[in-house]
Amino acid sequence: MSKQTSIATSNTTFQFNKTWEELLDNDDFVKVFLSDVLEEYILKQRWYGGKASKLKYIELAEFFKIQQKGEVYYGLILEVNFVEAFYQHYFLPIAFVTDENFAKKDRILPISINNQDGFIIDAINLEAFRKLVFERIASASVKDTTKVQYHKSILFYNRDYKSSRFMGLEQSNTSLIYNDNSVLKFFRRIFGDKNPDYEMSRFLSEKKEFKNTPAYFGSINLVDSDNINITIGLMQEMIPNDGDAWDYMLKEFHKVFCNIEYKKIDIDTLPNTELYQRLNIQDIPAQIIDWAGLNLFVQVQTLAKRTAEMHIALGSEFEETAFTPAHYNGDYEVWLKNKMLYQFQNRLNTIENNIHKLDGLALKLANEFLDKKNSIRKRFVNFDWTKLKGERIRIHGDFHLGQVLVKENDFYILDFEGEPESTIRDRKVKQPPLKDVAGLFRSFHYAIYANIFNNKDSYTSVQDNLFKAGETLYRYITGLFLGTYVTETQNANLNLGYNQERIFILKYCLLEKAVYELGYELNSRPQWAVIPLKGISNIINH
C-alpha cells in the first residue's frame, strides 16, 4: 500500500493512506506522532507531572483498542523519558473526528486518513467515547479475560447512559460525571500495577461495606504485554456534598478567630492542655467551648469516628493478603529508615539553600531546626521494631482534610491513591494507622494557620497572639480526635499498641509529615514555612 507522509507544522496536515484501524501499526506515523506532535501537546496538559524535569523523548509503550460495535478508539500508554534518567507512564485515549466542531478542545493534530481530512483529539472530549466506556462497564461480564478488562460491581445496576460531563479542573487525573450520580476517574499518570485507589475503593465498598466512602461501581484495567494489570479507570458513586472538609474547617476556624474580638476573649487566660492527651468532650473546659463553639468539637468527633471505622475495616481482613494486618519487622524498619533519612537530608539541603527567604518566627524556627538537626535525624533512626506490639495495615496514605467530603454533618473519605512522591510499591506498604491520623493532624494545623494568613485584615489581634490562640485550639481539637479515635479502635480490637507506643508512632509520623511539607513550602511559598516548622518544633520540644 502506498503511503504519503508530511510532517505537520501549524499549517500542514499529516497524510496517511491507511485506515484509522491500521494507523498505529504504521511505524512512520508512530515515529512522527510521538516525536513531533505529542511532545509539544503533553507539555501543556494539566495532568502532566513532569514539568519540573527536562523531557528527552516519548515512546509508545503499549496501545490497545477501546471499542464497541465497530466504533474504535485507541488507548495509548506513553513512556515519557527524561534527561535526568528516569521515566513516567501516561494514559492518553485518542479519537479521529472529521467534524471540526468535535475538535474544539484538546486537538492533538490535523490529519488526513485515506483522503478523509480530520483531527486526532483526546477522546475524553468526545461524548460518543464517554458513552461507549460507560456502556462497556455497564455490560461487563463477570469474568473478562480480554486485554482491556471492564469490571462492574454488584452495586452498579439498572443504569442506562443519559449524560456525561467533566467534573472540573484536576491536576493529575480526569474525572467524568455520568448521569449526575456516578464518577469515572481516568488515571493519567499510571503505574505497572493495580492503582491503590481502585484496590482500596473496591475492598472497602464491596468487601467491607464501609459506608463513608463512595461506593465502587466498576473499573477498566489493562493487562499489558508483560501480563501486568494496570488500572486505567475507576467508577464510583457520586456523593452529593457541601464541599470538602478543608473549606469547611477554614470557615469554622474563621468563626472561632472572629469570636476573639466578638466575645472579648483574653488569649493569655485561655486554659491549655498537653499535646497528644486523649480527651472527651467533657474534658474540654467551658471557656474553650464558649470561644470555639460546641459544634466544631462535635464535628471533630464525627471525623475521628469515621477515620477509626475506615481503619477498623482495613484491619479486619484475614484472607486477602494485600489487606491482612502485619506486625512490625526488620524489613519494614530498614525500608522506613532509608526513606526517612533520604527525605530528611533532602529537606535539610532545602532549608540551608532557602533560609535567606525567611524572617521572624519562621527564621527562628528554621535556625532551631538546623541547630537540632542531629537530634531530629536521631529520632528517625531510633525506630526499633522489636519494642512495638501494634499492627500495620493498608492505610489511606495521603490523608488530609481535602480528601474528605462533608455531607449533612457527616464525612466521606475519598482518593486512596497514596502519597504523590512515593512509588507504587511504597504506597502499598502496610503502615501504622496512626500515620493517617498524623496526616489529618497536620491538616488541622495547616487550616488554623492558613486561616490566620488569609484573614489577617479581619482580626484585630497581633499575629503572634493569633498563633498562640491557634496552638491552643489545635491541642484541644487533636486531643479530642485522638481520644475518640483510640476508644473506637480499641473497642473493635484494632491493635495500635500500648499507650507509649501510640504516642511514639504518632510523634514519629507527625515529624515525618512536617518534614515532608517543609520542602514544598520552602520551594513554593516561604512565608508558609512557619507552619511545618512550628509542627516540627512542637514535636522536638515535647
Image (tube, grey):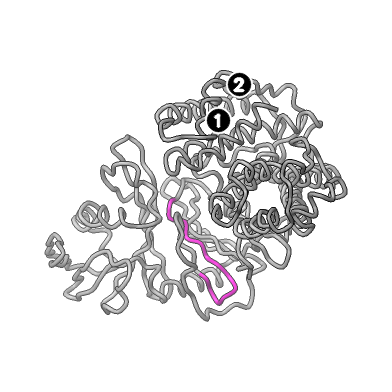
User: For the magenta stretch, what is the residue range?
Assistant: 177-189
- The residue at 14%/62% (across/down) is 9
Horizontal and vertical percent for residue 367?
51, 25
The residue nearer to you, when weighing 168 against 160, is: 168
From the image, tell me which residue sits under label 1.
365
User: Crowding near pointer 1: few (<14 within 10 Å), some, many (20+)?
Assistant: many
Q: Secondary structure at mark 2?
A: helix
What quarter of the picture does the C terminus occupy? top right
Horizontal and vertical percent for residue 285?
84, 47
Horizontal and vertical percent for residue 179?
55, 77
Q: Secondary structure at mark 1?
A: helix
From the image, tell me which residue sits under label 2.
381
Mark 1 residue type: Leu
What quarter of the picture does the N terminus occupy? bottom left
Q: Is tag 1's residue or tag 2's residue first in the polypeptide sequence?
A: 1
The residue nearer to you, when weighing 171 against 28, is: 171
- The residue at 80%/55% (across/down) is 290
- The residue at 69%/53% (across/down) is 260
Side of 374 relative to 305 (left or right): left
Side of 116 relative to 147 (left or right): left
Mark 2 residue type: Val
